Image: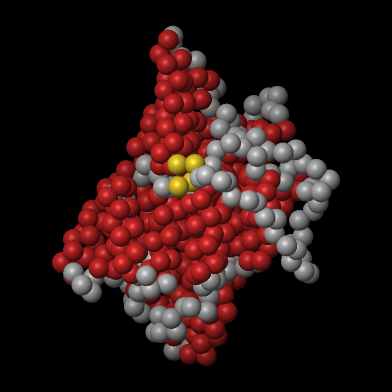
Amino acid sequence: MTRTVTTTHGGLVRALAGAGLLGLLACGDARPAEPAPSQATAEKIPPAPATTPAAPEVPLPATPVAYADELAARDQRIAAIRARAAASPPAWLTLQSLAEALLERAHLSGDYDDYAAAEATLADAFATTEGRSGPWMTRARLHFTLHRLDPALADLERAAARTGLSDRERAAIDGLRADIAFQRGDYEAARAAFERLADARPGLTELARLATYRWKTGDLEAADLLYARALAAYEGEAAQPRAWVRLMRGLLDLDRGRHREALAHYEEAAAELSGYWLVEEHIAEVRALLGEREAAIALYRDLVERTRNPEFMDALAELVAADDPAEAAALHARAGAAYDALLLRYPEAAAGHALEHLLARGDAPARALEVATANYAIRPNGAAATLLAEALLAAGEPARAAATIEAALASPWRSADLHRIASSVFAAQGDHARAASELAAARAIDPTIDPTASE
């Protein structure tokens, strides 16, 4: 099987760490204001509506917020909290506020140095309490964002054991527990919790969590409606959550091969928050898919310069390879070195991104399988299972690949990638009828999938 990469699928993975953004919105000082549930919005969300109601339309702002301004606002808040902390020996609550502000910045910037600063601040906070108390929930959200699911759950249990929790705090704990269940492939527990939370308080966080569940289990129309409702429910001042929801609707269209529709949503996200690298990444991706190669190259060159993100290096390499193979090779080498450094620093968070790089390169199947196995051990969901099956097949282990893909197919997880890799696995075993059936299932979700990609 040959893996052809012209898009930054790792960018999708990072965008879907929107669970991290959602976790940030779910509690603490960073939570934007949301409307109280009303009779009109508190109805039970059906698992599969017989008809699809029209999605609520949320008008775009007359002038987008600039990403630089949004980042500057985060920096001002961080500076103000640091000034308070420096004025006297800081209490752990002050350090918690600082850690939350740093997490806000990290979710906006995508910079691992911001996560490191938040982690160091949390360590200082716990040091002041000698482990007797502290910002358990904030650290749980940091752990979750970095895919450290066991530590996240341990901190959640400490947070849940506190007395006098408010309904909002309990809902935040329950929501993050459900996020962890979803990442671990415990779909029934995640679904039940997401539905209950969205029914009780249908704000942006709750509706977007349920939307992501619907999307990843194959109910794409319901997912799109829920994202639209999430956008309509948001009344906060920060532009990032609005841009993020519009971006997610675009990613949903991308998964269905609706490239023009995806671009329209991305452009709406850019109209909310201009200059946001996460939105621009996906605009570059879809420009490449639409054949607008020069525009995509220009965007990726700018993104590589601004962010030094290895995903963008790989994407740019694919686009310039035909004209300048030496530049492509240099970009791939830079990306590989960056992934190696990230795997050393944050192995759980980097595993999925590094794996995409290794599978696309195809020149280190043993290393790819090592990373895929570790990634699946951390979060055994459908996405990780799909990547593990692909790595097993590339490493010459079709029987293990088949067992892995069969388990994923038996779960509620559904995606064009799952069916595409399943087709490759069954073809490798000589089951050409089932391979054809799985490829048809993939193309039913995304008609643009290359029918030769699974050969």
Q: Position of residue 391 (x, y in %)?
A: 37, 69
Residue at far left of view:
326
Q: Judge from the rendering whether residue 56 lies leftward or rightward of residue 453; answer left or right.
A: right
Please indicate, yes or no, whether residue 446 appears anywhere in the rendered image.
Answer: yes
> 455 and 429: which one is in front?
455
Q: Position of residue 140 (x, y in %)?
A: 52, 37
- Residue sitting at x 40%, y 56%: 281
Quarter of the picture containing the C terminus is bottom left
Is 108 drawn above or below residue 372 in the view shown?
A: above
- Residue sitting at x 40%, y 80%: 453
Is 243 drawn above or below residue 359 in the view shown?
A: above
Q: Judge from the rendering whether residue 367 lies leftward or rightward of residue 62; answer left or right.
A: left
Residue at far front of view:
62
The figure's colour scheme reads secondary structure
Q: How many numbered badges does the structure rendering display? A: 0
Q: Position of residue 413 (x, y in %)?
A: 58, 66
- Residue sitting at x 54%, y 42%: 239
Please indicate, yes or no, whether residue 181 appears anywhere in the rendered image.
Answer: no
Quarter of the picture containing the N terminus is bottom left
Q: Position of residue 276 (x, y in %)?
A: 43, 47
